[in-house]
Amino acid sequence: MPCVRSNGTSVSARPAKSKSHNGLQRRRPPLRTDYQELDDAALAAQATAGDREAFGVLVLRHQAAVRRVCRSVTGDEHDADDAAQEAFLSALDRLETFDRRRPFGPWLMRIATNAAIDLLRRRAVRRTEPLNEALVASSRSPARDAERSELRAALATALAALPERQRAAVTLFDAEGYAHAEIAEILGVPEGTVRSDVFHARRRLREALGQWDPARTKEEG
């Protein structure tokens, strides 16, 4: 099973050894070079049949989007890593339930969203630091870059203040480009509920960012 790291890389498990008829150890064949040419459904079929390398390609293909969704729901980089890892483990366990006639992305995103929400509910005390330290620390000192970092931090704070489902819905719609119907399937709610969640989330984000004043922020600092 591949291991997802916070830097966006993944490490596959070491190739298992198998015994030949004479008892000698030999390694499995190396990763096939044509995996990248397969679509998600074909990779899922091979992974269901026990091909872990095929599942590793699926992880590499979708891990960035999964982490973004988990990050939007949890509001924390470390929690996003934990939720993403849990999502891929759950997806591997449930791969036989995936309908290969349908897109793989929404199926996986539903698992990821649920994993992130479940992680939050397991937390006895939620973290309170809303700022993305990596964004703030990456400022290159010019005023414009600093202002952009402050705006991203304000957006992260505003997202963190949204209810979990609204946060997931607006991220899937605006950041990941899913349609309302697809998000409804991912979140397990009616399409009308998704439209309402996206509408109210956008309004709350506009209100929060409308109150953000970089000049005032500097004066208060």
Image (tube, rainbow, N blue to C red):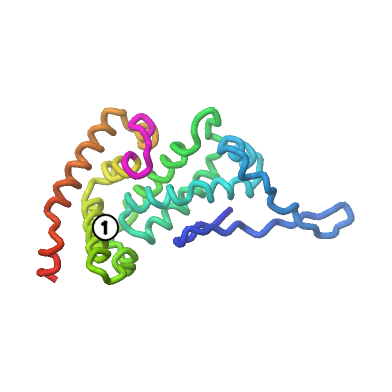
The dominant secondary structure in magenta is: helix
Q: Residue 173, how many percent across, how many down?
A: 33, 39
**Which image quarter: residue 48?**
top right
Residue 56 falls inside the magenta stretch: no
Position of 31 compared to 57: left or right? Answer: right
Q: Residue 208, how many percent across, how many down?
A: 16, 51
From the image, tell me which residue sits under label 1.
Answer: 152
Instruction: Identify the amino acid type marked 1.
Output: Arg
**Which image quarter: residue 212?**
bottom left
Judge whether residue 188 can be spotted in this image.
no
Residue 181 falls inside the magenta stretch: yes
Mark 1 crowd level (few <14, some 14–19, many ≥20, 10 Å Cα): some
Instruction: Identify whether 62 is placed above or below 138.
Output: above
Which residue is nearer to you in this view: 80 or 176?
Answer: 176
What count of labels does the image hold? 1
The segment highlighted magenta reads 173-182
Which residue occupies 58% across, 39% down?
A: 44
Which residue is nearer to you in this view: 65 or 25?
Answer: 65
